[in-house]
Image (tube, coloured by chain):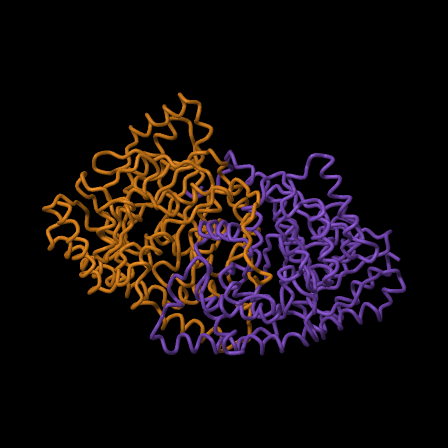
Chain colours: A orange, B purple
Amino acid sequence: MSASSTTSSTIAFSTLGKRAQPPTIARLMAMALETPGVLSLAAGFTDNATLPVDFVRDATEVMLGEPKDREFLQYGTNQGRPRLRQLLAERLAKAEPALDPVELQRGLFVTNGSQQALYLAMQVLCEPGDIVLVDRPSYFVFLEMLSGLGVRAVSLPIDVKGRLDGGALGKLLDGFAARGETARLKASYFVSYFSNPSGRSLDDSEKSTVAVACSAHGMILPVIEDGAYRELYYRQPHAERSVLTLPAWRDFPKFYTSTLTKPFATGLKVGYGFCTDEAWLQKMLHVKGHHDFGTANFSQAILEHALASGGYDAQLARVRPAYERKMRALHQTLVAEGLPSLGWKWAEPAGGLYLWLEAPSAINTGMTGAFCRACLEAGVLYVPGDLCFGDAAPNNFARLSFGVLAEAQLVEAGRRFAAVAKKFA
Amino acid sequence: MSASSTTSSTIAFSTLGKRAQPPTIARLMAMALETPGVLSLAAGFTDNATLPVDFVRDATEVMLGEPKDREFLQYGTNQGRPRLRQLLAERLAKAEPALDPVELQRGLFVTNGSQQALYLAMQVLCEPGDIVLVDRPSYFVFLEMLSGLGVRAVSLPIDVKGRLDGGALGKLLDGFAARGETARLKASYFVSYFSNPSGRSLDDSEKSTVAVACSAHGMILPVIEDGAYRELYYRQPHAERSVLTLPAWRDFPKFYTSTLTKPFATGLKVGYGFCTDEAWLQKMLHVKGHHDFGTANFSQAILEHALASGGYDAQLARVRPAYERKMRALHQTLVAEGLPSLGWKWAEPAGGLYLWLEAPSAINTGMTGAFCRACLEAGVLYVPGDLCFGDAAPNNFARLSFGVLAEAQLVEAGRRFAAVAKKFA
């Protein structure tokens, strides 16, 4: 036995340490690895064929070719590169003309993907036992993060059309008040553009209805709007405003998060957040200082260059139709294979990376169920929909990602999925 | 007032959020910015002139030049690139031949600088109110991180020569037992090679003395050894072993952390940790999954390439004499200006980025003291030494970094510092 042999410890972990669970995505990846030839519609990875080798090369050649100033290889600042933050502020102000770019730059910071921004927001707002209101369905990695922090996710009520329902939210808030739990409510969270997992976008009125219901209960809760897929539209942007400029949200502390690299090159992992509340912003920055004291300067500099040169937009112009084609390849296969006539329902998204399928209620799509096993045996994997709910999870949904597979693979994966669906019809 | 105007919130922050304080480094940076022409011996930045533009360009040209496989622009895994982890494992096994590279690779993960590795270790081990034993002096950013997590730092006792003192540690542990605080002790931590701030390296016997004292008290505490500066020696490595192979530490859960980019290019920010305890490792990985699900793949790929091609070692061969020259420029200036005869004491380090000065006991080097103000007025800044102690901080130390300034600037900064010291003699 070598000196470094792993010990089986009796370490007294912290409550956070005790709560730590393997992420679902790791279980799904393990399932895929154990199944040779499986086509994964589960992974949230992005398209390989269109990765912007050219624009990243342009950036690094310019940066490294005339190294008068090598500062991009040196430590940066905790908040992020000023010029990158300026470019991001100008970009956000273009989407939301009521916003002031100078103010945006001041409240904006760069993170290790938008995930770190979400983690920081939750760390400084929530104690174990606190409650966060989440969209229904919601981003399952965020839900796992909440679980890791000991925070309870409660779904924002939706109506029969799947739209946020302010009236029902009012009753939910009444319930919290009646149980003396109001003080435990710490924030609301939603993915509002081409959502993960639903592909849906929220409109002004349904976003506002949440603010109106909270205001009516005197609950000016911090709100986190996740705009990760906002720029990943296929034909045109979703025209509705963010909470940053919607009047109903005016008095709420707001944190808008997004990513630069999801639609560009996920390997660079640069996200950002803009916070309207100075105290909240500073606390997140202080904790980021403890995490890492700033996101890798070199990755930031590449993105800064790509934004300034137009390479970033050129790349988005390239990937948008590519993702639409991929979406259609999967969507049309499922239609052609007759899933709708078997009672499966879904909407064709106008952006993003996901089809969100509702199975007939008799089918259990859960990870340990017969349907999921049959899919694996047929060589196709998906994200069980029950993972995407804060509470009261139905077990007949499935998230199918068309991000990483090529079109021909998507057709094959769709056929495999449909073949299993037919067996279970 | 625009729609995004920052609000002055009444957010109910978490206790972690409430504890969050501006990092000292930010205060020092602000002090520097407010003083035009100041030469900063405070910043822990690295040498600009030797930044490896060539080796990073080699790496990116190869990676981006033949983009058959663009995977380095795609998401990586949470634990880090397997080949990078293999190269790191082989490297560590070369320094510590008793270690098995295969086992090392399994227990090793890649982080956003070594700082994230330290943060993850503390998150999964410590509750607010817990205690961590730290070297004396210790790395002040680690101490601030502990403070942010509500964890109390208690210094490992040292003898008159500044060496770790097992006998005194035994008495300290007796004291914890007598006060019923033993269960709150969660880990020990030290920077053991060319330390920040002291420049000292620990030898086998003093490292072992900590393990022996803990063992004698039945306290098999997790240990974190910070090897951030291990490769930043000037002439030869510090030959002593890490806790990973010292017999006295055999039964302890061990976490060895270091950085690839401190001696290479800090703008890439890639660190790593190797953990001997499977449960501890998994918990840190799970929480890392919540932080960011993996460090930026592209930065990792650059380091992987630099390690494999020999560029990494070539860069280290370049910076080692450069840092020695810089150290000497500052050291010799302080000697020539007569600081020793004024009662200032320090040791000439054999590696690292810092001179650790002990002032005559009458001089208070604290941030708000007259000496620090006089230095700022004279155009030179340092890190007040009292920030570098877990407890019972003396106020007559100063950390002088020679990392970022050029040699001529170091001479000038040393003269300015000495001029102030003469005034206070």
Question: Of B383 and B351, which appears nearest the observer?
Answer: B351
Q: Position of residue B313 (x, y in %)?
A: 58, 76
Q: Position of residue A388 (x, y in %)?
A: 32, 43
Position of the C terminus of chain A by quadrant: top left
Q: Position of residue B99 (x, y in %)?
A: 58, 66
Q: Is residue A262 left or right of residue B211?
A: left
Residue B38 at least partly seen? no
| Residue that extends furthest to the front in the rendered view of this protein | A1
Q: Position of residue A54 (x, y in %)?
A: 36, 73
Question: Of A211 and B331, which appears nearest the observer?
Answer: B331
Position of the N terminus of chain A by quadrant: bottom right
Question: Of A84 and A406, which appears nearest the observer?
Answer: A406
Q: Is residue A62 left or right of residue B191?
A: left
Q: Tag count in the figure?
A: 0
Q: Residue at x 64, y 48 (%)?
A: B220
Quarter of image, res A75: bottom right
| Residue that extends furthest to the top in the rendered view of this protein | A178
Residue B223 at least partly seen? yes
- Above or below residue B31? Residue B181 is above
Quarter of image, res A376: bottom left
Question: Of B9 and A159, which appears nearest the observer?
Answer: A159
